[in-house]
Image (tube, rainbow, N blue to C red):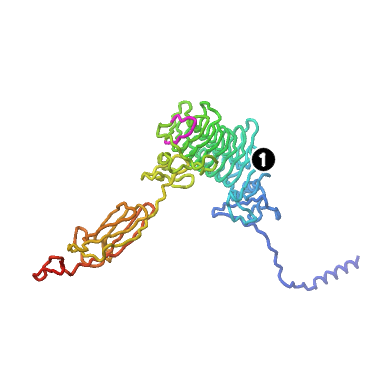
Amino acid sequence: MRKLLAYLSGLALMLTSMAVPVLAAPYTPGPVTTPTFDCTIFDSCILYVDVDYAAAPPSDGTKDFPYQTISSALAKAKSDSNYRYIRIAEGTYSAEGFPLEIDMADFSHNIYLDGGWNGLADDWAERDPAANPTTIDAGGNATAIRYNGIGGGVTGLRIHGASAAGFGSAYGIDVDLSGGSATTMTVSENVIYDITGFGGAAVRIVTGSSSATANDNVMYDVSTLGGPFWLDGDVDAYNNVLHDNNGINVVYCTNGAHLYNNVMLENTPFRVIHAAGSCTVQHNSIVRNQLQDNGTDYGAVVMEGGANVVANNLITHNTGNDSSRHLAGDTSTFEYNGLYGNTADPEAGTANNLVCDPNYAVSNGTNADDVMMNSASDCVDAGKNIATITTDFNGITRPADGDDDGDAKSDPGAHEVPAPMVTAPVISNLDVLVDPFSPDGDGTQDSTTLGFTLNAEADVTVEVKTSTDTPVATLATSETKNGSVSYGWDGKGTGNTDLEAGMYKFVVMATNTGGSDMQEVSVEIAYDSTPAPGEQCAGYTDVAAS
């Protein structure tokens, strides 16, 4: 034991006397990956989702390490209110917990789901929903996306596969804002299809005290009671294309919903639009729909509950029932609609509802521009101007003077026929016939003529000015001219005053709605030094001049 203690004491002494070796260089830690989030100035951070991410290192929702599922991003956003925006890369998302639910019980902030991004492989540099399809496959679940009491947005997604058996309801996007605080909601640039159920809709929006917009969506193959759109409340639905749907309705709207600039064509419903009270339906094209029941509760546009306004729509080539129908004493406004080729038009010729052939560009097809009117149609400028609708489906300004009669009025339907293109005037061949000339009344070269050519009809103004731009005479003011044009000038100034000899210029301005042109040409007044014939010179007749 004494030997062991002695050994340990010696070892301790040796260790305390050893020199500590000096390292060749200070130790530098290796790179540490610190998540960097994209945030706005309001600290509303972005989460990224890319189904094709390889998951090494593990996903954390950053741009470089995105989540693979939308459900994961929602779980993160649920736990941290800084996260509001979720960018979703192209690909098919089916391994999700459906419905993708944003509920006021779990979220205190709006959530925005935004598809169409090109993802990690291209550093998230581009958002283009058409080029980068982002597909939500509900896989037979009843609802793909549900918002309850929370606003935000669903944009740039392709949603399909929601279905419900029996009398169940199926939804692509189901939004109910009525139970939460006032907020806003946007549903745009989505393609929604293959939604099947007895009840439900491709998109249902109930606003309560909130508001919503639904624009630039395409919906087809929807077979539900509500149809592609079920709109209840302060919803503006515009620039949507709804085709080849076969539910009860294509659109059900009530309680302040506003539909405009939408195209609804080649559907097979019982009603295309069911305006169930306080719904405004303006500037829509309702074309080539085959109504499945000729009963008195159905038709292309069915109105009930009162206070609906249906105006400036094109309702044409619909078969199977009437183009319009009022239920149970309904007194809604139905006016300035263009009607043609329907099975029956009970309101044709009333309230400025016009029977007119739109002469569509294409006789079939499901593209919105297939139902653009021909400029020669009697429907052009047949609507009334609606102050709140200032553009059409393609962004053309309303109203436009499509029939070129000088009075711009809105066209019925989703498309506005623009005013004819007016060729801007160009002045050419500007010339002075007599230059110089001598306006002295001697019968020789007393006047001159200005001539020029216009390539298009325009309002012409011609002034005479000094070489220093002082106006001295006006030959024309806003005279409509075209082709070869000429004006004579007797060399007199305004008020028939004599002008001094010298250099002057004609200034020609031509203007129309296409543009304007201005040209100028000089002319000289040079009075004769020789007396006119028969004049006396020092008491003798000037025979040389006669």
| Magenta segment | 336-347
Q: Quadrant of the N terminus?
A: bottom right
Vertical comparison of 204 with 446: above or below? above
Q: Quadrant of the C terminus?
A: bottom left
Residue 103 sits in which quadrant?
top right
Q: Nearer the viewer, residue 139 or 247?
A: 247
Q: Nearer the viewer, residue 271 or 451?
A: 451
The residue under the point 85% across, 70% down is 10
Vertical comparison of 525 with 133: above or below? below
Q: Which residue is mark 1?
A: 139
Image position, residue 495 (x, y; %): 19, 58
Q: Nearer the viewer, residue 97 or 330?
A: 330
Residue 3 inside the magenta-drawn segment: no
Image position, residue 482 (x, y; %): 34, 53
Image position, residue 543 (x, y; %): 13, 69
Kind of residue indicated by mark 1: Gly
